Amino acid sequence: MNARLLYLLIFLLGLSACSEAPEPPSGFAGLGTEVEGYPQVSRNDRIRFPEALGAHPEYRIEWWYVTANLTDENGQDWGIQWTLFRQALQPNQGKAKGWQTPQVWMGHAAITSATHHWQAERLSRGGTGEADAQAQPFKAWIHSWRLSSQQEASFSPLEVYASDQDFAYRLQLSTDQPFVLQGDQGYSQKSEQGQASWYYSQPFFKVEGQIEVDDQQLQVRGQGWMDREWSSQPLAPGQEGWDWFSLHLETGEKVMLFQLREDGKDYYSGTWISAAGEPTPLEPEQIQMQPLELTRVAGRQLPTHWRLQIADYDLDITTRPLNAKSFMDTLVPYWEGPIFFEGSHQGRGFLEMTGY
């Protein structure tokens, strides 16, 4: 979350009486700054379920992130995004209630086709009941948007719902695969200096349901991916943004890759996930990511086509977007959209680019 967003949230949500606005932070979204009073991610801890599904308000930031690559009954390709962010404006305030809680929430939803990109944003304050996340039964929501379990005692199946003036979707996500712990048993390092987050994924969702655009209701099905991450300082000072890929290989494997950009000292990380759900962390030197083609989007040049290589797994692919204009023109702007890839492997996935 960058300074502009923080100030806008304070203004829009009436938070100025609760805390003084901090100095403008450095790095993308202010996530490369030191923050006193927040717990830091430590290798000595571990991810625990089902607690990991719910909110962690003592940490500075976290998110629940769902993407899906879909096809309708006419063979047309689509992508959807549903994201819920939580940000703490101050370290843990103990028993603060209602509007006195230092938590703010932001939701993003989008539908992407080859020719259009629909998007919407929601903002809310913690402590009001309008936005939150609970572990069991699992539910994450902001206003009417929700990601929620359909059974009391199990995570899957889920329903994801969002709507705006020009679009809506209601999808069912199901899987019998366990969660994938990214990095070292969920400890995901983000720099050589030791910044890290807790990070796990569910990349094996089967998805079906309905989308509505242009007064049309379409039946869709496909593959989904959920990322879950929380931290107090996920970036190092000087890191300006990231390029993140989730890949569904036609052979059944899944791959997560990201690079954090910093003036020639880019930091790489990733995971190779077998079709059975077994993750193998990738070392930075195993990963090569090369931008191939730039697209002028929202007044900036963005690398929308890439070459990705993991020699140890004989992966050498080129990616292309379903829609090169899949830009989230939200309070914190970024590019997010469905991609296709070909080469040594074929498949579909998602790309997110921030900090450009």
Image (tube, rainbow, N blue to C red):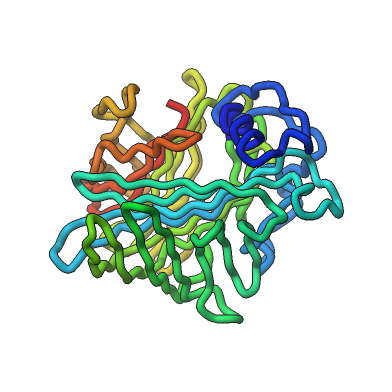
Q: Return the x and y of residue 170 as percentages of the image width and height.
A: 38, 67
Any part of residue 183 in sight: no
Residue drawn at (23%, 50%) of the image: 113
Q: Quadrant of residue 78?
A: bottom left
Residue drawn at (65%, 44%) of the image: 87
Residue drawn at (62%, 22%) of the image: 26
Q: Return the x and y of residue 148 as percentages of the image width and height.
A: 53, 69
**Residue lying farthest to the right in this orientation:** 95
Nearer to the camera, 123 or 276: 123
Any part of residue 37 in sight: yes
Q: Quadrant of residue 28?
A: top right
Residue drawn at (64%, 41%) of the image: 13
Nearer to the camera, 180 or 295: 295
Quadrant location of the C terminus in the rendered image:
top left
Q: Name the side, left or right, on which 36 lies relative to 220.
A: right
**Residue lying farthest to the top in this orientation:** 263
Q: Return the x and y of residue 139 as percentages of the image width and height.
A: 58, 67
